[in-house]
Amino acid sequence: MTATIQKSTMVVCGSCGAKNRVPAVAEGTPRCGKCSTALRWVVDVNDDEFHAVVDESSLPVLVDVWAPWCGPCRMVSPALEKLAGELAGNLKLVKVNADENPTVSRRFEVQSIPTLVLLDHGKVVDTQIGALPEHQLRSWLASKLPTGA
């Protein structure tokens, strides 16, 4: 049974500056209502929402398992959000607080954070444990994303 996810976030288009409401779950890729540019897709989810937001996504999903008290998590987060913008239309970034969502942590056998899990249609493509600089995260994603992303 799929959970109905009503939440959305406001995203400013990097091309035209228009404000757009981007839902946590949608078919395809979120695009600007004014200029049709692909929008950055970043979603915070909990255990109950995870399946609908991640496993049923038509785009590859980068899951960031983090915690608010984790210094390396806070260091890597801005880089991940920047990369989500650069890869708009080709990647969905999903952030999961490990302290509040033990089911997701168990599913991916998270033993240290940050843990990044790249999934394509719900299947694990690769996992990265620990914080990396932005350029290394970019290279890792480029090497692991499906061709054309």
Image (tube, rainbow, N blue to C red):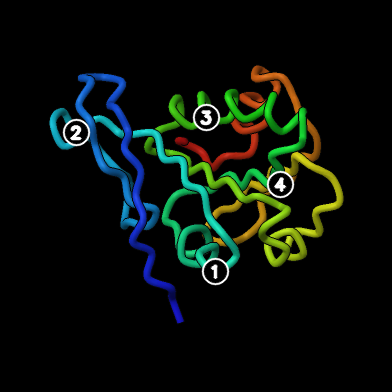
88 with respect to 129 (left or right): left
Relative to 16, say whether 8 is above or below.
Answer: below
Q: Compare marks 4 and 3 and give the one earlier in the sequence.
A: 3
Q: CA distance from mark 1 to mark 2?
A: 31 Å
Asked if disc 3 and disc 2 are in contact, CB closer than 8 Å, the reply is no
Relative to 75, say whether 145 is above or below.
Answer: below
Which residue is drawn at the image coordinates 58% and 45% (left, top)? 95
Numbered disc 2: secondary structure: loop
Q: Compare marks 3 and 2 and give the one earlier in the sequence.
A: 2
What is the three-letter code of the residue carrying label 4?
Asp
Which residue is drawn at the image coordinates 70% and 67% (left, top)? 103
User: For the residue carrying disc 2, how many other residues have a C-alpha within 10 Å: few (<14), some (14-19), or many (20+)?
Assistant: few
Q: CA distance from mark 1 to mark 4?
A: 23 Å
Q: State the residue position of label 2.
A: 36
The percent position of residue 46, horizontal first and vertical second, equals 57, 60
46 with respect to 5 (left or right): right
Q: State the residue position of label 4.
A: 126
20 with respect to 96 (left or right): left
Which residue is drawn at the image coordinates 43% and 39% (left, top)? 90
Q: Compare marks 1 and 2 and give the one earlier in the sequence.
A: 2
Q: CA distance from mark 4 to mark 3?
A: 19 Å
The image quadrant of residue 148 is top left
What is the three-letter code of the residue carrying label 2?
Ser
86 or 102: nearer the eye?
A: 102
Q: State the residue position of label 1.
A: 48
The residue positioned farthest toward the bottom in the image shown: 1
